[in-house]
Amino acid sequence: MSKQHWYHTPTRDEWLERIGTLRTAREGIEMLRNFREQHLGPDRKTYDLKKEANWIESRIEMRVSQLHAEETLSDDDLLHKTIDGRCAREVANSWWEKAAQVDSAIELGQLCVAYRKACKPPMMPINYFAPVEKKLVSKLLKLRAENYLVTPIEELRKARNVTPIHVQ
């Protein structure tokens, strides 16, 4: 049970127990990837967690970061490699190269979401993640600037394959 009573919910406590069972960074990476796929982003599989999803994600990220730091032998690896051991610069450049080939705001928006899910820290060091995120979003805003605000909402929904949900 959470020590801070204003953060106490049965859902959070259940997830804290699951997170507490993680013993290796590899287990944590798998949990974080699955969680992001299931509960975050516009392409999420379920809305079951509603407001709890971001809080739970942050707790998983903290645990994964802790496990990764304990398992990593050098500071250089923490600063210049992804959590799975790849060169962070090469991974970041590969995402930017993918974006350079995209000329559609819809496709680039999807690429931005995929990038965040795949590379958001602790998966990649922030010193490599943030510059590419900035470039991707800047390009996305430029592509959208031409006609995004004057396009009817129904056309935008159709182009993005959106299913509206109604919350009461």
Image: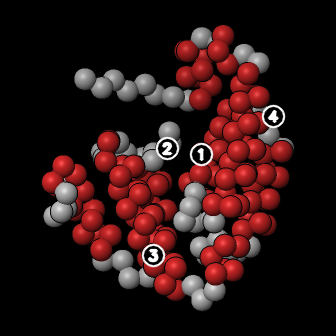
**In this view of the protein, which residue sits in the foreground, 134 or 100?**
134
Q: CA distance from mark 2 to mark 3?
A: 24 Å
Q: Tag 3, which secondary structure?
A: helix
C-alpha distance separating marks 4 and 1: 16 Å
Q: Is residue 85 visible to the viewer in this orientation of the structure?
A: no
Q: Percent x, y for residue 123?
A: 58, 66
What amino acid does circle 4 point to? Asp
Disc number for residue 42: none
Please state which of the two labelled residues, at mark 4 or mark 3, is closer to the viewer: 3
Q: Is residue 161 above or below residue 92?
A: above
Image quarter of residue 66: bottom left
Q: CA distance from mark 3 to mark 1?
A: 25 Å
Identify residue type, mark 2: Gly
Residue type for callout 3 = Gln
Residue 3 versus residue 154: which sits nearer the camera? 3
Q: Is residue 24 left or right of residue 109?
A: left
Q: Which quadrant does the C terminus fall into?
A: top left
Which of disc 2 and disc 1 is earlier in sequence? Answer: 2
Residue 66, which numbered label?
3
| Residue 83 in the figure: left or right of residue 18 | right
